[in-house]
Amino acid sequence: QSVLTQPPSASGTPGQWVAISCSGSTSNIGTNTVNWYQQLPGTAPKLLIYSDNQRPSGVPDRFSGSKSGTSASLAISGLQSEDEADYYCAAWDDSPSYYYVFGTGTKVTVL
Amino acid sequence: EVQLVESGGGLVQPGESLKLSCAASGFTFSGSAIHWVRQASGKGLEWVGRIRGEVNGYATAYGTSVEGRFTMSRDDSKNTAYLQMNSLRGEDTAIYYCVRLTVTNAYWGQGTLVTVSS
């Protein structure tokens, strides 16, 4: 099964802008919408972005998502210390059968 | 409030079986698909599979690493989903989460740890 590719790490100082990429293929990101999850240490993941660029209620507007072709991106503006976490993209994949695939994960460090 | 509570994890030897449960509340369980996701220590998230609700015939789908060894089921009268894991291997060691995915949200349980070791 496919996997979505993310950079292993990203970092920034408080207040900076950080972006995380997620590379997929035509059978997943190219066809279906992308979700982003935030996982704080020792906790279950939390949905941050759904349908490429929508935020669930309660998620700060510092987090934004975008998609182009077979790639997606999560941006964090005004980085805060509490944003230090692992971030995963995810999407449904149509090939060879319908399954859910996660990205490899990106550790965001606030310097 | 949506709640998902996993149970049944523990230490088993390679080749043995284990059955996990996911008790749900706060939503219409019978109409909802339930997913299982696992995470090995220090590793990323892996989708294990999902079982759909009654209206979709309780259809199941599995990840390639578990297909043929793991079976999902559910008892809508008890608002509980199950993950039967057979022929367990060391690489199945992970925290197992049950998850309810909707278009606009995702609800995760706290997870249950499965350790496969001799």
Image (tube, grey):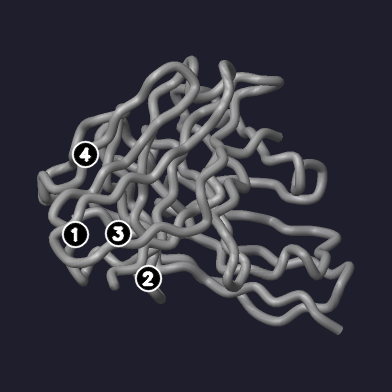
- Residue corresponding to mark 4: A64
- Residue corresponding to mark 1: A79
Q: Amino acid at mark 1?
A: Leu
Q: Nearer the viewer, mark 1 or mark 2?
A: 1
Residue A94: x percent and y percent? 59, 19
What residue appears at the point 38 percent right and 20 percent down from the top-left corner? A68
What residue appears at the point 38 percent right and 45 percent down from the top-left corner? A20
Q: Is residue A5 left or right of residue B85?
A: left
Mark 3 vs 4: CB contact within 8 A: no
Q: Nearer the viewer, mark 1 or mark 4?
A: 1
Q: Tell me where residue B89 sits by quadrant.
A: bottom right
- Residue corresponding to mark 3: B3
- Residue corresponding to mark 2: A43
Q: Nearer the viewer, mark 4 or mark 2?
A: 4
Q: Chain of mark 3?
A: B
- Image quarter (top left, top right, bottom left or bottom right) of the C terminus of chain A: bottom left
Cα–Cα span, label 3 and label 4: 27 Å
Please rate how many residues cluster around mark 1, counting C-alpha atoms within 10 Å: few if below 14, some from 14 to 19, many from 20. many
